Amino acid sequence: MKIIAHRGASGLAPENTLKAIDQALISEACAIEIDVYRSGDSLMVIHDRWLHRRTNGTGQIKSTSVQQLQALDAGEGERIPTLEQVMERINGRCDLNIELKGPDTLMLAHAAIDYACRHYNFSHDQFLLSSFNHQLLNESYRLRPELKIGALTSCLPLDLAYFAQQLNAYSVNCDVDFLNQAMVDDAHQRGLKVFVYTVDEEEDIELLSQWGVDGIFSNFPCQARKKARSKVTQAKHVWAD
């Protein structure tokens, strides 16, 4: 079982900021998960489309310029980074899960991945594109089948992991509150990895390890590793293997 830093090490620093990315790298996370929304021709690393939820700003990201966004306080004096800034900071040192939060994010994400592979020491197999928008994931696979996709779900589907297999997904990314052994087994039988969010409690880590999940998203990646102890697979990467 591998540990993925959720929105960076978001339990130690404001989520999705460069400080959270730095904390995740210090914790030697083998992967980092972030969220992106589009503003103009840039992808901004932030979880919510309404600015007041995560910053001292107001309004929606889509109607705010990059310059205006990067003038806001995202917590502890941190700014909202662009996807390129996050990629530059990571510089290929671990894998990156980019959650696409808007329908107009896909092409920019593809371009950013290509740029990072040319300039920031990444390889294409270090990236996982995930989303609750399964139409977007389907389009990604149609255009760029070599890029891994992770099908997010916040429920326990009637057909279990069938939907993710139909999307040609690499993984099914599940809510810890809506998961059982049958879902894990079904996903594995379909050749899918199972990653679970958001997992910080030792009891959850123990249970998920017994179920055989492949990885967990944690706000405290270093603490999660300690709680998991021998259950954690030591590796530099999660999906680039």
Image: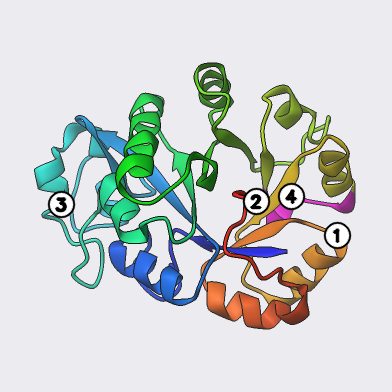
Task: Quarter of the image for the N terminus: give it.
Answer: bottom right
Kind of residue at disc 2: Asp
Residue 50 appears in the rendering: no
Tell how many labels: 4
Lower sequence index among marks 3 and 4: 3
Stretch in magenta? 174-181
Which residue is under mark 1?
Answer: 211
Q: Report x, y in % for residue 238.
A: 62, 55
Kind of residue at disc 1: Trp
Q: Report x, y in % for residue 212.
A: 83, 59
The reply, left or right, for residue 75 in relation to residue 134 is left
* Distance Cα–Cα, label 1 vs label 3: 42 Å
Kind of residue at disc 3: Gln
Label 3, secondary structure: give it. Answer: loop
Lower sequence index among marks 2 and 3: 3
Lower sequence index among marks 1 and 3: 3
Q: Residue 155, which numbered label? A: none
Query: Which marked residue is nearer to the observer: mark 2 or mark 1?
Result: 2
Which residue is under mark 2?
Answer: 241
Q: Is residue 169 above or below residue 84?
A: above
Whether tag 2 and tag 3 are in contact, CB under 8 A, the answer is no
* Distance Cα–Cα, label 4 vs label 1: 13 Å
Viewer-proximal residue, 71 or 120?
A: 120
* Distance Cα–Cα, label 2 vs label 1: 22 Å
Label 2, secondary structure: give it. Answer: loop
Which residue is under mark 3?
Answer: 70
Colour convention of the picture: rainbow
Which residue is under mark 4?
Answer: 178
The residue at 26%/52% (across/down) is: 85
Q: Report x, y in % for residue 109.
A: 38, 34
